[in-house]
Amino acid sequence: MSIKESGMDRLFLVFSNVFIGVFALFCFLPFWMMLMGSITNETVILLKGYSLFPEAFSLEAYRVLFRSSTILRGYGVTSFITVVGTVLGVAISALLAYSIANRRNRLRNHFAFFVYFTMLFNGGLVPFYIMISNWLKLSDTLWAIILPALLQPFLVFLMVSFFRTLPVELEESARIDGANELKIFAIIMVPISKPIIATVALFYALTYWNEWFYGLLFLANDQIYPLQLLLRRMISNMMAARNLIPAGAATVNVPSLGIRMAMTVITIGPIILLYPYMQRYFVKGLTIGAVKG
């Protein structure tokens, strides 16, 4: 039996679609302008400003970037940070979340309190800097970027909410067969938790890929600068863009503005390409633990 839609329902649906479409257009417009600016001749940008379509097509900014060893090295550093940080972050968050959600764990409420407490309070920037640089001796290492973001309380509680929706009978049947808690987690819980694992992995990957502040605090060696820190230097300093020019390249009419925009495009490109493959897990992972019944 189908339910008839009233005129107000159809009007609301049309209004919602129009509103979302306009909102999406406004979100997409800055990226489009940046993309068009990166393939526009530098002189045209300086004389006429930015436009929806390039008046004078030029790929000089991309040629300079892809010939620069600094960008390639930054890509490698950022990829390493993202992969290692995401794998470790997901593993630690999943183990902690399962421990909090496990009804057999008598300390689960204490663990939950410790995690929740860090969402509300922190020691501040100065103690944090002293701990990383003086106590842990992680200055000028990539672990100074990976370690601080290795455990995010919000993502832990997101996984806790998911684990609590799983049938308890699965764990009980595994225990009857002689499995311990680690085996239950690895063989039973992980395979059926792909949506939430993919969702949390995407959050961690976005965090590590876009991280530049910890690099600014703890890295002095420009040989291990991540990609986002290079981008920040370029945006804040015109000379930093010129320093990307490889040796032997022409130094006249360097597209400094174009390099900035091209750098931004190639920086966010991998994340844009990754999201469509993760979208189905992302939506399911966010909603599956929201309602329990």
Image (cartoon, rainbow, N blue to C red):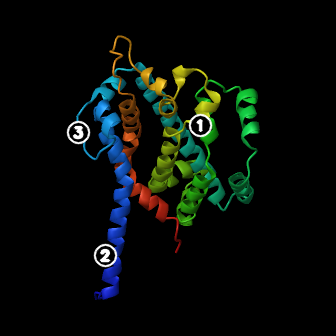
Q: Are marks 3 and 1 in contact (CB under 8 Å)?
A: no
Question: Closest to the observer: 168 or 36?
Answer: 36
* Kind of residue sitting beneath label 3: Glu
* Kind of residue sitting beneath label 2: Val
What secondary structure is marked by label 3? loop
Residue sticking out furthest to the front: 47
The label number, if any, that marks residue 14 in the structure image: 2
The residue tagged 1 is 213
Q: Residue at x 39, y 19 (%)?
A: 245
What secondary structure is marked by label 2? helix
Real-space Cα separation, disc 1 to disc 2, in angstroms:
43 Å
Q: Is residue 27 above or below residue 71?
A: below
The residue tagged 3 is 55
Q: Could you tell me residue 202's position as x and y percent?
A: 47, 48
Q: Earlier in the sequence, mark 2 or mark 3?
A: 2
Q: Nearer the viewer, mark 3 or mark 1?
A: 3
Question: Closest to the observer: 158 or 28?
Answer: 28
